[in-house]
Amino acid sequence: MQQTSAAAVRPSWRTTCRQALAFVVLLLPGIVWFPGDADATGATLAPIHDPREANAGSLWLRPSPEADVIAGLSVMTGIQVRVTGSTARVEITQRFRNPSDEWMEGLYVYPLASSAAVDRLTMHFGERIIRGEIQPRETALAHYEKARRSGRQASLVAQDRPNMFMTSVANIAPRSEITVRIAYLEIIPFRDGRYTLKLPLAITPRFVPGGALEATPESVASSGTVPRADIEIDLRPGFPLASLDSHHHALTATRYRSETDRRVVSSRAAMDRDFELSWTPQQVADTVATAFTATKDAATHALVTLMPPDTAAQPAPPREVIFIIDTSGSMGGDPLRQAKTALQLAIARLGADDRFNIIRFSDDASALFAAPQAADPLARATAQRFVHSLRADGGTRMHGALALALDAPSRDERLRQIVFITDGSVGNEAELIELIDSRLGAARLFTLGIGAAPNAWFLAEAAAVGRGSPTFIAAAERVDERMADLFRKLERPALLDLELHWPDGAQPDLAAPLPLDLYAGDPLMVAIRLDGDTPPSGLTLAGRDATGHWVRQVPIVVLEGETGIAKLWARERIGALSRRKRLSRDAEAREALDERILALSLDYGLVSELTSLVAVDRTPVRPGGAAGATEQVRTAAPAGTPWARSAGFAPTASPAPLLAWVGALALLFGAGMSVLRRLAHRQRLSQEGHPARRP
C-alpha cells in the first residue's frame, strides 16, 4: 500500500519528458537572442579580415601586413565645411587612439562624396605634423612600405572606390593618439529649386554576385550607442535664403546681421546615416546662366550653371514606364517600406495613355505582367496589391532585372522610361554600368536611391549613363516631396537633344560631354577650361521641347573670387575619362585613358584611381619588436536597416542567421536529450525500488 501510494504521487516518465521539453522551449528565445549585445562600450569582438568591411569611418589596426585588422578606438570626429557659391571645401578630422601596448599599422576607411576632389592630407603624431603629396599610386605605395619597414611614421591615402577612400598609417606608438585630416572640394548640386550638401557618414554593405558580401559589419544595434560627428558649416551662398534645413539631424544656425546671406550651421550628427543640408534661394529665375571662374596656368576654368525652362504648362507625352524594385535583404525594414510607398505613389500617378510594368528582384528577377499594360484601373489595382505583398530577402542580383527591363521590346514610339528603385548595395557596379550603356537604346533610366546610406556614386553614374536623373529618399517623411520632384522629371522632360554653342570663336574644353537631355528641376552644370584669362561673353542653348525646336541666347554673369574651380574641372574630367575607360573593351584605348588620368591627377594634385597622397617622416621612431592584438570597437550601422537591428549578421544572401538558429537548436536538443536520459534512468531506478541518485 505504501509503494502504491508513492507511485501515485510520483510523476510518470511521459510527464517528465513534457516538462523537460517545455523548459527547453522557454529557454530557446533567450539563447537565440543572446549574441545580439548592442552595447559597444568595451566590447571585445573577433578580428575582421578586410578594413573595407567598415560601415562608418573608422581606424583598423594591425601589428603586421599579414595580420588581421582590429578596430581602433575613435575619440573624435569633426567636419568643417566652407560653402562659397556652389562649391564646398570640406575638411574631415578624426582622432584615434592605439589602445594596445604594441606598435601598430592603422588602416583608415571613410566614405566621401562621389564627386570629391581629394587634394590634402595631414597626419598629426603628438607634436609632429606630416603633410602628404600626390604621387603615382605604385610609387606612393613603395615609399610608404619602405618607411614602414624602416620604422618611420608614414601615411598613404588611396581611392578604393570613387566614393570610398583608405588611409594607411605606419608605426603608431603604443597608447598614443593620432589625428587624420583629409580635405576635398566638391560641387554642390542644385536640383528642384534647392542646393543640397551631402556628407557621407555611413556605408551600406555591398553584395557581390557569385561571392560573399563585400562587407559584413560588426555594428552597434539601433538601441546601442551610436558615434557622432561634430559638424560646422560656414555657409556663404551669395544670395538671400528662403529656407535652410537638415533632413535627418538637429541644427543650430547663427545668422550674421552684417552679412544677410551668411549662416554658420552646427550639428552633433549621429553617424548612422548621411548628413544632408539643403537651402533654397528666395528667387529662382527661369533660364538664367552664371559662371564662376578661376585662372590656373594661363587658362580660365569656369563652372557654368544653366536653369532649364519651365515646362509645367506643356502636355505630358504618352510613356511606357518600367519600374524595377529591389527586394533583397539589404532593403529590409525602413528602406523597403519607403520603396513600396514611392512605387505606390508612382502607380497612382500614371496617366490614362501610359503603359507600365513592375520588375522585382533579389536572388532572381520576375515581372508582374508578361508585357507592359495600359494604366487602367484594373491594372493599377493589380499592381498595388503586388507591391503591398513584397518582402525583403535574398541577394542583390541586379543584372537580371536590368536586362529584363532593357531588353523588353517597345510596341510603339512612346517615351520609354525605366525607374530603378534600390539602395545600390552592390560591388559589381562596373558590370552593371556597362550593361546599361550597351542596351539602353532609346530608353531613359532614372534611379531612386533608398535608405540612410545608399551607394550614391553608383546611382548617379547609372542615371548619367542611362540619360536620366537620380533622386534620393532617405527618410519616410520625405517620400511625397521627393516623388513629386521625380514625377515632374518623368512626365515632362524640359529639353531633349541638348546642344551648347559658344560665340566669339571660343573653343572650350568641357570636363565631360554634355548631357543629351535636361529635366525639370535639374540645371545644366558644365565645367570648362579655356585658353587665356577671359571667359566667353555668352552662350546659345538649343534643344527640343514638347512644342518643337527650342533656342535661347543666354548672357553669362561672371562672379569673381571663386576658389577651387580648376581642381573641380579636373575632377570632372577625370570622372569622365574613368567612365570611358570602364565602358571600353579596347586594351590600347584603356591604356591611353590611364595616361591621361594620371597626367591630370598629377598636374592638378588630386587623388584618383591612379594616384595617392603619401606622407613620410624622415626620422625613425619605432624601436622594433612584435605587436599584439587589441580590442575592436563596433561602428554604427545605417539607420533603419537590418544591420541596425541584428547581432552583426549580414541580411543579404547570408546563411548566418539560419546557421545561428540551427546551432542553437542543436545545442538545446543535445542538452534536452541528456536531461531526458538522466530523468528516465532515475524513473526506472525509483520504480524498481533502488535509491535514486541526483541526475
Image: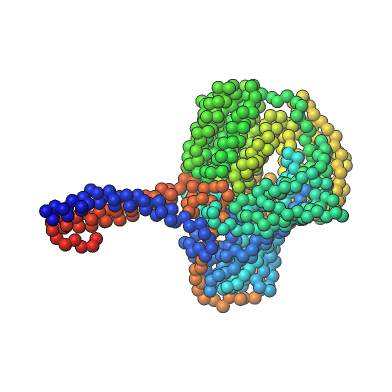
Tell me the residue at 60%/23% (across/down): 375
> Exactly how many numbered labels are in the figure?
0
Tell me the residue at 54%/54% (across/down): 223
**Quadrant of the rendered image containing residue 129:** bottom right
**Quadrant of the rendered image containing residue 57:** bottom right
**Residue 277 placed where, x, y %?**
71, 49
Looking at the picture, does residue 403 appear above or below residue 575? Answer: above
Asked whether 292 or 390 is in front, the reply is 390
**Quadrant of the rendered image containing residue 225:** bottom right
**Residue 115 placed where, x, y %?**
69, 49
Looking at the picture, does residue 442 appear above or below residue 601? Answer: above
Tell me the residue at 82%/31% (across/down): 551
Looking at the picture, does residue 491 appear above or below residue 128? Answer: above
Left or right, 307 with reference to 615? right
How is the rendered protein coloured? rainbow
Looking at the rendered image, the quarter that the C terminus falls into is: bottom left
Left or right, 666 with reference to 326? left
**Residue 626 placed where, x, y %?**
50, 73
